[in-house]
Image: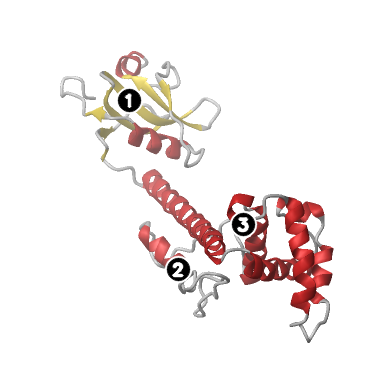
């Protein structure tokens, strides 16, 4: 499942290969990332075909009985125990393989869909669960389960690419703050502590949103009313904040200010209020 591979990933149950070569590049392009930007491998998704098989097997075991036709975990155990000896007849290279692996599955593994063991053991167990499922579970249900896995993997790559794109946008915002952002207009603040400041009418109140250095030497992002800003002499350290700037995109002051500017539906300040 290496995204840079030219070899299509073979499906287990789907009729077509689940991933196209370099699919992660296409996703990165969709969110506006240049081709040369590397997107980190998302956490909690399979790193290769072996891990994908393990994840798929766990999804099959975790699927509800309404979907798979097995209403109770004990039914799964009995089905596997009945299936393995017959399937072993087709395993000339390793007689007893399927039965051995089936009986190595603990109740916890079957009941909770969390396979345990060393990587090679995990893969053997996954192969066994997938082989059993192919013989004993409706193929439409199995295709649905695999498609859900594919969708989750692609969404993880999309989320990672969007996070990377946002990270680049925040850095660009910090390095070169734009003149205007969604109705906010940047202005030159006089106080030495202010790194960048914007003004607008927010919910009917003339306001200033700024990144500044606190007395502790840390950068902070706050919104203040224009009155507070003027009364403090343009010193945000002395002014009472009207709103604290917050962000889900990072905890840096510039990330918080950018998110704040993009969040509120503001109007440009009238000329008689503008700084």
> Residue, x 67% and y 64% (percent of image)?
54
| Most foreground residue, 80 or 214 | 80
Q: Is residue 94 left or right of residue 272?
A: right
Image quadrant in which you'd find residue 10: bottom right
Q: Is residue 57 left or right of residue 139?
A: right
Marks 1 and 3: in contact by CB < 8 Å?
no
Asked if residue 53 is positioned above or below residue 162 in the image, the reply reads below
Asked if residue 143 is positioned above or below residue 206 in the image, the reply reads below
Percent coordinates x, y for residue 134 in the rendering:
63, 69
| Most foreground residue, 12 or 234 | 12
Which residue does the numbered mark 1 point to in the structure image? 208
Which residue does the numbered mark 3 point to in the structure image? 68
Counting every numbered tag in the picture gives 3
Which residue does the numbered mark 2 point to in the structure image? 23
The mark nearer the N terminus, 2 or 3, is 2
Q: Is residue 207 left or right of residue 127?
A: left
> Residue, x 26% and y 28% (percent of image)?
266
């Amino acid at each position: 499942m290496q995204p840079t591979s030219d070899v299509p990933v073979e499906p287990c149950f789907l009729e077509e290969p689940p991933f196209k070569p370099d699919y992660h590049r296409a996703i990165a392009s969709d969110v506006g990332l240049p081709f040369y930007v590397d997107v980190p491998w998302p956490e909690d998704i399979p790193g290769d075909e072996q891990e994908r098989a393990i994840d798929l097997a766990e999804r099959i075991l975790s699927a509800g009985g309404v979907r798979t036709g097995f209403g109770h975990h004990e039914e799964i155990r009995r089905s596997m125990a009945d299936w393995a000896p017959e399937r072993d007849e087709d395993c000339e290279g390793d007689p007893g393989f399927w039965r051995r692996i089936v009986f190595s599955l603990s109740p916890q593994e079957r009941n909770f869909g969390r396979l345990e063991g060393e990587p090679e053991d995990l893969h053997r167990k996954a192969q066994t669960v997938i082989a059993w499922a192919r013989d004993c579970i409706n193929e439409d249900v199995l295709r649905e389960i695999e498609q859900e896995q594919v969708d989750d993997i692609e969404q993880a790559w999309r989320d990672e690419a969007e996070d990377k794109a946002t990270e680049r946008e925040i850095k660009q915002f910090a390095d070169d703050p734009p003149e205007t952002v969604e109705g906010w207009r940047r202005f030159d603040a006089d106080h030495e502590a202010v790194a960048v400041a914007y003004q607008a009418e927010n919910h009917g109140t003339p306001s200033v949103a700024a990144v500044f250095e606190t007395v502790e030497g840390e950068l902070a992002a706050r919104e203040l009313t224009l009155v507070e800003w003027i009364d403090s002499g343009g010193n945000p350290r002395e002014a009472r904040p009207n709103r604290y700037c917050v962000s889900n995109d990072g905890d840096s002051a510039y990330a918080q200010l950018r998110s704040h500017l993009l969040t509120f539906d503001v109007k440009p300040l009238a000329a008689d209020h503008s700084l």
